[in-house]
Image (cartoon, rainbow, N blue to C red):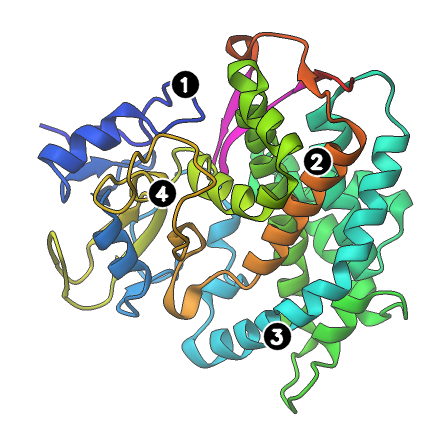
Amino acid sequence: MNAPAFPFPSGNRLAPAPEFAERRRTCPFGAVTLPSGDEAILLVRQEDVAAAAAEPRLSRNHVLPDAPRNSAEPNFLYDPELLINQADEAHDRVHRIATQALNNTRVARYVPVVDRVAGELLDAMGPTADLVEEYCSQLPLLTMCSLLGIPAADAGRIRRWSGAYTLATPVPPEERAELVAEFTAYLRGVVAAPRPDAPLLLDLVTPPDTDARLDHDELVSIVRLLVSAGVEAPSGVLGRSVLALLSDDAAHWTALVENRETVPAAVDELLRHVHMGNVAALRVATAEVRLPSGTVPAGQAVLLAWIAALHDPDAYDEPDVFRVDRPVRKNIGFGGGRHYCPGVGFARALIAVALDALLDRTPGLRLTVSPDEIVFAERDIGTLVTALPVRLG
């Protein structure tokens, strides 16, 4: 008998799929069948996911010989130049430089750019808007373009390319290959001649406080990843976050309007509460690995179900409730160990600025449709809100 198919159906698509809770109770270390037909052990408990995320013998390299695949369709994760698929020494050097370029000090320099872009987008809106199309997707896109010295006039092309690269925008495989090639060629030009008003790119080209340098191909690869992840992931989380705040008669939104000092805590809670939906990260064991719920044999694939771990009642009281008074703990949805996401500080800052700008200018923000009418799209990068019709108030 084949193992159950994964991903699971999404339920209400902001909350975790119901199957995660059932597996935590009855099968926390069981197999599932991936879209490719390969099998993997699904990890759903916080302690297992945290241990696996920090375990160097569970490799993120998706191009290892005979490695199980999540999807049979071409996917950016199988790009041999991608950071996670690099050899240890190269990976650690690129990861260290990217982490430096996005540390708290550097991110603080980028916040005024986010704030400026947010204001310009809100100034351009009418009394009603599709907040996904006009704000949630545009804010990270235009911010990242500005930080990398990419002209705003090219933002539309960047969005199409990054969507094709990450499969956030489904296109036929042949067309996707053409778009990714165009994307790479364009970024080669950006990297070859950095503009003086491109602080993030300049910090990657000439990293401060180190003699380490990236070669041209490494720069192109990390910039392509930053553009893609720095646009698609924040856009998806922001859309899901605003929907969560405006649901239930906008009770959580009203609470933020009345208690603005809770925005930082609300951002952390949103990153836990909605995450990116029912996606999971694939790892492959390069040696036998013991986890709290079982032993992973060498060569076995495992899936780290982030949202299941972030809703584990053994780790979070009332995990399905949105609470800004929740004790602070590390969000394992950003990975762990040597693969911890370099952009976590930037993601938090961008979402905080996005919410602050909306709270300042549109405190009466409301949905113009029932939350049940919101349409979602299941993508490799997560469960995306496709449109968010609102009245700005």
User: Disc 3 or 4, which lies upstream in sequence?
Assistant: 4
Which residue was labeled with disc 4?
Answer: 70
Residue at mark 1 to residue at mark 3: CA–CA distance: 38 Å
Magenta segment boundaries in residue numbering:
375-388
Which residue was labeled with disc 3?
Answer: 100
SS at badge 3: helix
Mark 3 or mark 4, whichever is nearer to me:
3
Query: Is residue 19 among what the camera can see?
Result: yes
Residue 238 on image: x %, y % = 61, 36
Q: Amino acid at mark 1?
A: Asn
Residue at mark 2 to residue at mark 3: CA–CA distance: 26 Å
Query: Is residue 177 among what the camera can see?
Result: no
Q: Is residue 5 left or right of residue 201?
A: left
Mark 4 or mark 2, whichever is nearer to me:
2
Residue at mark 4 to residue at mark 2: CA–CA distance: 26 Å
Q: Who is closer to the viewer here, 3 or 264?
A: 264
SS at badge 2: loop
SS at badge 1: loop
| Residue for point 32% across, 26% down | 17
Q: Residues within 10 Å of mark 3 (few under 14, many from 20)?
A: many
In the rendered image, residue 386 lying in the magenta stretch gets the answer: yes
| Residue for point 21% across, 36% down | 32
